[in-house]
Image: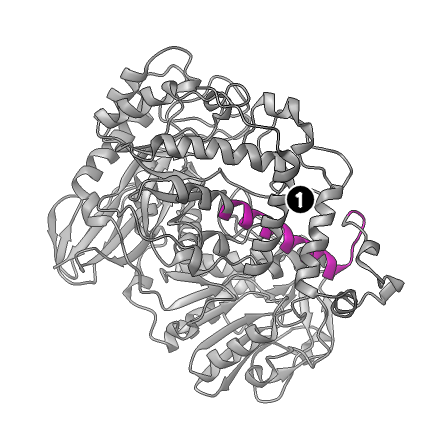
Amino acid sequence: MIITLPNVFETIKKRFKLLIIGVLIATGGNFGSSAVHAQSYSFDDILFGVAYYHEYMPYERLEEDVRLMKEAGINYVRLGESTWQLWEPRDGEFEFEWMDRVVNAMHKAGIKVIMGTPTYSIPAWLYRKYPEIAAMQENGQRLKYGIRQNVDLTHPVYLYYSERVIRQIVEHYKANPAVIGYQIDNETHSKWPDGKENHVQYIEYLKKKFQTVGEINKVWGLNYWGQAINDWGELHPPSGFNHPGYRLEWARYQRFTVTDFLAWQASIVKKYKGASQFIVHDFAGALRSDLDQKAISAVLDYAGVNIYHYDQDKSDGLRIAMQGDFTRSLKMKNYLVPETNAASIGWNSREQFPPYDGQLRLNYYAHIGSGANLVSYWHWHSLHNGIEQYWRGVLPHDLKPGRIYKEVAAIGHEREKLGKKLVNLKKNNKVAILFSEDSDVALNLQRFDNNFKGPETGPWDADGAYQKILTRFYKILYDLHVEVDFVFENTENLNQYQVLIVPSLYIASDAMLSKLNAYVKNGGHLVVTMKSGFCNEYSAVRHDTMPAGLTDVAGFTYQEFSTLRNPVPLKGDPFKAKNENYTEQWVEFLQTTTAKPLAFYDHPFFGKYPAIVRNNSGKGAMTYFGSIPSESIMKSILTSVLDERNLLSTDQQLPETIKVKHGISNSGRNLHFYYNFSPAEQSFSYMYSDGINLITNQPVQKNIVLTLKAWDVAIIETK
């Protein structure tokens, strides 16, 4: 099939530039309810499967692969996201027979398909014709061919070709009964392009947002170093520009371009897809500050996240839970996991840690217990070519079923029995964590941490303090078996949560600070850490008394602060933390007005200032950390806050390696998921209502002692 189109790049260039800037500014990067699709595909069963690349196989084996999938209980595959050069081998020439054969084979076997749009890895012919679509970096070097995601997402030539291939694929499969949805792009992020045209687009963005150069001079304070501008042409490109306000807005712009790009892709797919087909994107991990995952999710039917985690002796379910909770919170609905570990992972062979027996199954149920409706392994077979040769799949390199395949099959057969009972799991959490991309970015620009180590939650973790503080909070709650949601600056109803945790909200608008004040006054308990409220939304330090905007509910003020070269202990070990009786990194010189000090520093100078305070205000309270306490201290304080709110239960009596999650099933029954993240058998008392263990189909009575084998799981459904 050959399609010829006139060379209209100049027209397309102008049209797309207007589209990008216009949509971007009009929506403020948040596409809102107008972009949300009407509900299409409805999950009535868990989807369980793999990413499948028949085109990567060393020899023909489609029939054999489909047979093995069917025998393993696999009911879903993702196809096509890495194959632009096969869809369109030459400019304007499209081929579908190669993929039709795969799709038809899957449909015949009863396996559902999500088709990926192939825009994240451009074909060689496109780069050869238009090398300028590769992103120009701030160092003046343009990205080369040979890596994926090397393009400028705003470049009109790239957008022209992307629109054409997307439209061809979606039109071809819109009526295909096997294809239930489309994954737009793949793990999309900006390459922070900084060419001449990018600067022009950034200027247009700034014009729409700030209107005049006078306003931008004011909010950024460009009189500093005499950098104020008289007209927009004087604004320097970001390369070499280290102004905090400029850099924060530049980061926002890059996030918005990704949102705009994916919203644009979603609009194309929506126009041509079948009515029952849905749209998803797979984020490369959660809690990213280079994306606005909340805004992107507004244009999706389902949010997806690729969750890679530790196995073997470091298997604890933390990454699965944290990234799952975050992704569920993006739309406050069930989410999809298009990629997760099948075996050992890595772009080299330095750290090959395939799961122990039982861990694959345990991790599958960990995804489901956080609200996943789809779990898919990357990928079906271990690759023989390319940089990901050691990111191993369900089948090993000899393509013969082995240990991993057998465990996948065991999961697949359990899914056939339990999937309809576990799909669409609902949560009713009373604790939330506020996530701020801006604060993460700004605290990485204005670093204060030194050798600060925090829990690791994913291969894409930021190395700054913000993510580490947030993760420390999450890990404590995870270990306490207290499940959480994540909230954002535009979350409207904070009052549904009894406890709201706010890690270092360094960048905060007046509206956000007012919202936090109202939360406390209305009866919530706010837990806040140092540096919160320090800067406004333009990264300008507030000229109010600190903590700016929070002094009323905080019950203290401060003017000075200090870096800590070394950890500082607390007087008298008030939280029985023993060798963890310390705070680190930073200290604010808190002076209480109405707040009650909970601990003081054991230090000849800092000792006159409280390290941790609590203040009652209105119907609620606020607890504040003027430094970064150890995990043990933080756990003690959080436990007391949760206990005061009656948010603790018998779950806290479980053995250390037993984790539990709760939810409500489609049929309205309570589900209790118990996980043994341990190589040893564990026993514990079951303290909820009588029910049935869905996995063994055996009755379970309250107060009975349950025993889980190593790396095993139990799911209790109450009567």
* Residue at the outermost front position: 6
Provide the secondary structure element on which disc 1 rests. loop
- Is residue 132 or residue 304 the one in the foreground? 132
User: Hey, which residue is sitting farthest top in the picture?
Assistant: 59
Residue 625 x/y as whole percent: 58, 72
- Three-letter residue code for mark 1: Trp
What residue occupies the far right of the structure in this picture? 226
Range of the magenta residues?
Answer: 239-263
Let me know if residue 172 appears in the view: yes
Write down the residue under mark 1: 192
Tell me where residue 257 appears, x and y as whole percent.
59, 49
Residue visible at 45% across and 45% down?
266
Residue 250, magenta (yes or no)? yes
**Is residue 446 toward the left or the right of residue 352 in the image?**
right
Against 375, is 505 above or below?
A: below
* Image label count: 1
Which image quarter is the C terminus in?
bottom left
Q: Residue at 56% across / 54% down in the picture?
A: 23
In the image, is residue 610 above or below residue 173? below
Query: For residue 688, what is the image quadrant?
Result: bottom left
Q: 90 or 553, which lies in front?
A: 90
Q: Is residue 155 visible?
A: no
Residue 4, position in %: x, y?
52, 23
The image quadrant that residue 551 belongs to is: bottom right
Q: Is residue 411 left or right of residue 632?
A: left
**Quadrant of residue 64 within the rendered picture:** top left
Task: Give the vertical position of 78 relative to 450 (above or below).
Answer: above
Q: Is residue 230 above or below residue 526?
A: above
- 8 is within the stretch colored magenta: no
